[in-house]
Amino acid sequence: MESTHASLLTGRKALVTGAASGIGRACAHALAEAGAAVYVVDRAAEAAKEVAEEIGGTALVVDLSDAAAVDALPDDADIVVNNAGLQHVAPLHEFPPELFTLIQRVMVEAPFRIVRRTLPHMYAAGWGRIVNISSVHGLRASAYKSAYVTAKHALEGLSKVIALEGAPHGVTSNCVNPGYVRTPLVEGQIAAQAEAHGISADDVVDRILLDRTAIKRLIEPEEVAAAVLWLCAPAAAGITGTSLPMDGGWTAR
């Protein structure tokens, strides 16, 4: 991040889920570079510790599908970035119910539990920022992604309720809605699609992933992190209960 952000969040504590890689890692770095002390939350222990060491943060190894473990997370964060997620692609009639439940638990219930516990601290301070990493799939649907699309739509609703309740207390809540981002999760999808369709990885990106976008490239994690940081800045203090598409024009159609 630019040096002008160096003291933007000095004295603030941020909690980022799924912070060991991809968007979460970029958010952890951006928030730390802006002066925040960051809780690096992820189930990948070694990767979480590595990120924490890079930014001078604190690694918290937690499986977000474990409600008791989620409820044991720190409750003193001034900034919460709900980013962790997982994907499974299958036709609805073949979708494993246990996977559907798992995805809701990690991507909807865990954010609810985290925010529920951190809001009293934010209310007492008169300041707080909730940033939910949603997706273009929080605004649009795609076939074969029933659990993911359902979870992201639910996160959008949760974010708006937080915004309404938090407004009198100086707390804002917003969603950031990227299209396909260059992350390990997406790279895994690219490899699987290439094998399934018998085409190259580049063709998967051009012909499948970017078919509905106007800007024909993947979004970089650092771009999403910059949006998250902006939503924590004074210039965005009046923005709450909204969704910020970073989808290359997907939702413009």
Image (cartoon, helix red, strand yellow):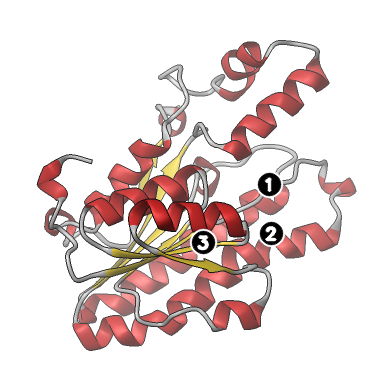
Residue in the image at 65% along x and 37% along y: 142
Query: Label 1 belongs to which residue?
Result: 87
Residue 87 placement, left or right of 245: right
Q: Secondary structure at mark 1?
A: loop
Query: Label 3 belongs to which residue?
Result: 155
Residue 98 placement, left or right of 203: right
Residue 148 picture location, percent across and down: 65, 50
In the image, 54 versus 137, the foreground residue is: 54
Query: What quarter of the picture does the C terminus occupy?
Result: top left
In the image, 157 versus 82, the foreground residue is: 82
Look at label 1 and name its amino acid.
Gln
Q: In the rendered image of this protein, does residue 21 appear above or below residue 196? A: below
Residue in the image at 34% along x and 54% along y: 55
Query: In the current view of this chain or complex, which residue is farthest to the right?
Result: 94
Query: Label 2 belongs to which residue?
Result: 103
Look at label 3 and name its amino acid.
Leu
